[in-house]
Image (cartoon, rainbow, N blue to C red):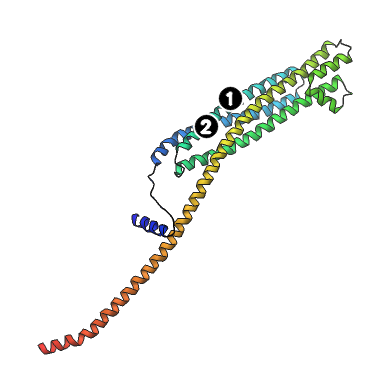
Amino acid sequence: MNDLYYQLKETAQQNGITIELIPSNRQSIAEMMPDFQKKSSMIRMKLQLIRNNNEEISRLTEVIQTAASTQKEKESMKKVEQLQIQINKNTTEIKKLFEEIDKLVKEGDPDEPETRAMIYNQKAIQQEVASILQSGQNTIFNYNKTIQKKMKRQLEILEPNLSEKQKTDIISDPQGLEKMVLKETLGQPSLQLVYRVQDIQDKFQDIQKLEKSTQYCFQMLSEIAFLVNQQGEQIESIEQNLNKAKNYIEKGEKILAKEQEIHKKSRKKMCCIILIGLIAIGVITTPIILKFVKSSG
């Protein structure tokens, strides 16, 4: 093995390539792997919890869409708010775990297979984060769209002659709805009308609160995705260096094989020359030996 190393080293130097043996740090990296695996498992578990919460929000969105009573709507919206709080909590914990994993990766030797395995694992989790980020955005978009449709239907009951633009403006500014109702009723709206206006305003506030909460969540997930993307660029750089080194080795092996073939042919040629020399010596010395034998007899 050492002979091959020195042969490759000599061939590499002839081609302007420097090869040195680097002491392995594999044992310390291997010691870090269990901690990395533990943190990765925790991240995946929390990602699954977020996925489950998103699915539950989708289910509650359907409940709100078909709810016949305001009470049922409010109960479902309250549950959605609680689910989003859980999502934010898990997202914060995931980001913290990612930072700890990032530290482990940076402490490792980029040339070690264990370090590359950690980075590959990060990239795999990144795909899950991206998927959940997209799923979460779609879930909240559908939820808000459903709530806004309910608000528009309530507005149609209050004022059937409102245009689509007026409905959108009122949904964006529920205080305008209150002014409109007071104007239409000359400052004396019925109790039922007051309740309906209040319900629309409550829905608007719930949407605003949820949007603020989800923005925090999406920001955290985006930062996680960016962190993993940086590690992805690192592994790509490592792979490029490894491919370059592999090409150098392959080139060195070809040159070495060629030189060994030349050396083999040279040895064969030398053997032929020696054999011819021995035959020539035999031809020259045989008569002398025979003459000496006869004279001795």
Residue at image coords 40%, 38%? 28
- Residue at the outermost front position: 16
Residue at image coords 73%, 20%? 205
The answer to whether 197 appears left or right of 107 in the picture is right
Q: Is residue 125 above or below residue 240?
A: above
Which of the marked residues, 1 or 2, is nearer the chain's N terminus? 1
The x, y position of residue 114, in whole percent, is 45, 41
For badge 1, the amino acid type reads Lys
Mark 2 surroundings within 10 Å by alpha-carbon count, few (fewer than 14), some (14 through 19), many (20 or more): some
- Quarter of the rendering containing residue 17: bottom left
- Location of mark 2 (residue): 99
- Looking at the figure, which quarter contains the C terminus? bottom left
Q: Is residue 2 above or below residue 187?
A: below
Residue at image coords 58%, 24%? 89
The answer to whether 215 appears left or right of 96 in the picture is right
The answer to whether 197 appears left or right of 100 in the picture is right
Q: Secondary structure at mark 1?
A: helix
The x, y position of residue 188, in whole percent, is 87, 10
| Most foreground residue, 142 or 172 | 172
- Quarter of the rendering containing residue 113: top left
Measure the alpha-carbon separation of dots 1 and 2: 16 Å
For badge 2, the amino acid type reads Glu
| Most foreground residue, 236 or 126 | 236
Q: Is residue 27 above or below residue 258?
A: above
The x, y position of residue 181, in whole percent, is 85, 16
Q: Nearer the viewer, mark 1 or mark 2?
A: 2
Q: Are marks 1 and 2 in contact (CB under 8 Å)?
A: no
Q: Secondary structure at mark 2?
A: helix
Q: How many marks?
A: 2
- Location of mark 1 (residue): 89
